[in-house]
């Protein structure tokens, strides 16, 4: 019977300096073609790169990047199963709205008695309850003072 071989995986070497990490970053950018693409864009036309850089260095561009990062962080908090349920409910809700809109032209207004009957429709209230709770939760959060994005907090921390 063969003897069991004990093998311990050595720790990966850690870069000693920031310079080594920078060299590794440049090497990775070069290997993936990102560096070549960036150089080609910059060489292609100084005017194009100047316009691009000016466009990126605006308050709106910084806001867009921060907003996208906030959306990505929010999506990261949602488990895929919940996101699947949300997208399914959203698309089915849109389908139901379209269907109701096409049928609405054939229906008469319910009138006061019809509206009163709707108030006592248990199935309707069971369907509205989650939406009303969601609207309440949204309303509670929308009135809180806004949080500063991480980038602005970091900039303020550095300036102190």
Image (cartoon, helix red, strand yellow):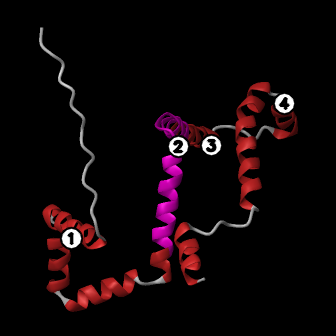
Name the mark nearer the viewer: 1 or 2. 1
Q: Residue 155 location in percent, x, y? A: 54, 78
Span of residues in magenta? 63-90
Name the mark nearer the viewer: 3 or 2. 2
What's the distance in space between the residues labelled 3 and 2, CA to CA? Answer: 39 Å
First reached walking from the N terminus: tag 4 or tag 2: 2
Q: What residue is shown with label 2? A: 78
First reached walking from the N terminus: tag 4 or tag 3: 3
Disc 1, disc 2: CB below 8 Å? no
45 w.r.t. 81: above or below? below
9 w.r.t. 151: above or below? above
Q: Which mark is residue 105?
A: 3
What's the distance in space between the residues labelled 1 and 2, CA to CA? Answer: 36 Å
First reached walking from the N terminus: tag 1 or tag 2: 1
For numbered disc 2, what is the local secondary structure? loop
Q: Is residue 145 left or right of residue 77?
A: right
For the residue pair 85 and 56, the one nearer the viewer reads as 56
Q: Residues within 10 Å of mark 2 (few under 14, many from 20)?
A: few
First reached walking from the N terminus: tag 3 or tag 2: 2
Q: Which mark is residue 117?
A: 4
Q: Residue 48 location in percent, x, y? A: 24, 86
Place residue 106 in its image quadrant. top right
Q: Which mark is residue 23?
A: 1
Give the farthest residue toward the top.
1
Q: Residue 41 location in percent, x, y? A: 19, 79
Residue ID at (47%, 76%): 62
Residue ID at (84%, 34%): 119
Disc 4, disc 3: CB below 8 Å? no
Q: Quadrant of the N terminus?
A: top left
For the residue pair 27 and 20, the one nearer the viewer reads as 20
């Amino acid at each position: 019977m063969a003897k069991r071989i004990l093998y311990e995986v050595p720790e990966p070497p850690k870069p000693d300096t920031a310079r080594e990490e920078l060299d590794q970053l440049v090497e990775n950018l070069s290997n993936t073609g990102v560096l070549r693409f960036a150089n080609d864009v910059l060489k292609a036309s100084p005017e194009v790169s100047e316009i691009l850089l000016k466009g990126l260095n605006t308050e709106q561009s910084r806001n867009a990047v921060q907003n996208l990062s906030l959306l990505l962080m929010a999506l990261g908090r949602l488990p895929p199963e919940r996101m699947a349920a949300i997208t399914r409910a959203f698309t089915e809700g849109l389908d139901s709205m379209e269907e109701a809109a096409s049928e609405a032209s054939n229906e008469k207004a319910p009138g006061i008695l019809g509206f009163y009957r709707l108030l006592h429709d248990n199935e309707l209230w069971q369907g509205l309850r989650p939406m009303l709770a969601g609207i309440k939760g949204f309303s509670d959060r929308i009135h809180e003072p806004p949080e500063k994005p991480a980038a602005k907090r970091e900039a303020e921390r550095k300036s102190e």
